[in-house]
Image (cartoon, coloured by chain):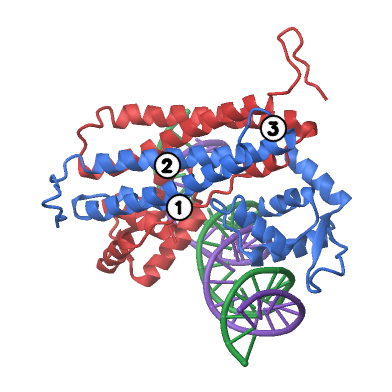
Chain colours: A blue, B red, C green, D purple
Amino acid sequence: MALSHAILVSLLDRPQSGYDLAKRFDRTVGFFWKVSHQQIYLELHKLARSGWVASAPVEPSERPNRIAYQLTEDGRKALDQWMLEPTEPPNFKEEMIVKLFALEASNRDTIRKEIERRRDLHTQRLAHYQALMAEHYPEPARLSARRRGRYLGLRMGIVTEQTTIAWCEEAIACIDLDAPKRTKSDPARPR
Amino acid sequence: MALSHAILVSLLDRPQSGYDLAKRFDRTVGFFWKVSHQQIYLELHKLARSGWVASAPVEPSERPNRIAYQLTEDGRKALDQWMLEPTEPPNFKEEMIVKLFALEASNRDTIRKEIERRRDLHTQRLAHYQALMAEHYPEPARLSARRRGRYLGLRMGIVTEQTTIAWCEEAIACIDLDAPKRTKSDPARPR
DNA sequence: AGGCTCATGTAAACGGTTACATGATTAC
DNA sequence: GTAATCATGTAACCGTTTACATGAGCCT
């Protein structure tokens, strides 16, 4: 499983509460990996039961209901062990492909519009990633080993979005290959 | 949800049994979407209970324990309705990114090896997709609308694998930026 | 006083995986 | 006969989502 290990990795940096972890997830990999706060709290309880994390001292200046966790020795060992295990490619259930398998003349316009929507969405994501890149990694050539991993994660996000956008353009063009010509003076959709 | 609709789409072509569907999944999108036969049988029962599929007549020449299903009118309507709904990008939980976030000097070689393994794996997949492309779509310029959707699905597989491979190469180079030089006469790994 | 953000949880349902189980037919 | 393939299922468990619930502190 992955989420528990993602939490452990995040705790490498510093002790964090479930709330911290959830927010950090949202800010960093949240775009392509949605994690709900419920799932994180659940996972933290499990990790605590396994003895891989333990509640860390909380400053009295902080919120009283805050519960921070830190990595234990056992947690660190489990993480090191996991790092040695092979990493399988994720299986991404892309619904768009399912819809494409149902492509026919009658739904061509629906599907093209849907692909256009997806293209725009991924364009927004790409812009967001590129902003993060410019902000945090203006000079990737000389990065500390510590930060290089994060840089590469962001790079994966960028190239993935670029590829998806390019594929969307290709798909739209391909779908329109034998479509009736639409001009600005006659933008009506068929069917 | 996606699997039930993937089944409905597959049944658009012809009535099929759970076994047929499982095999077809494996042959087509199986590389990036693993589906177990149990899940398919379960889904088929649910779809039958919803009245979206119904058992189709089976030729006496076929296996006696074979149960084929076909789309019903209701199923067709539900599918048409689903086609109109927006398609969210899949959230792919790429464990590699989690490992990268834990990158440091001590695990650099482990991670580089892991990325090399993944690169080789995706290279194999790419070769497989390209073979399928050459076999089934030698001339993509003029494809029937029916087959164009499948062609685009395969194209997505190809560009995704290409991007992943390129990213792996980039990541390996980046990780090795400040690594001790390794030559053929001295291929020992540091640490 | 009311609304926002911070902060943590429970419960039910759902989707998916793993393990286990069975039986028919085909090929050697 | 026995191994492989065809064919369908059950049960337990795990991970995730959705809905619901609560309370503290901060700002206006």
Q: Is D3 above or below relative to B90? A: above
Residue B89 is labelled as 1
Residue A164 is labelled as 2
Q: Label 3, on which residue?
A: A143
| Mark toward the start of the polypeptide (3 vs 2) | 3
- Mark 3 lies on a secondary structure that is loop
The single residue placed furthest to the left in the displayed view is A185
Q: Position of residue A187 (x, y in %)?
A: 15, 53
Do tags 1 and 3 sit on the same chain? no
- Mark 2 lies on a secondary structure that is helix
A89 vs B27, left or right, is right
Q: Are marks 3 and 2 in contact (CB under 8 Å)?
A: no
What's the residue at 33%, 26% (across, down)?
A: B134
What's the residue at 25%, 67% (across, down)?
A: B73
Pointer 2 local density, CA inside 10 Å: few below 14, some 14–19, many at least 20: many
Q: Are marks 1 and 2 in contact (CB under 8 Å)?
A: yes
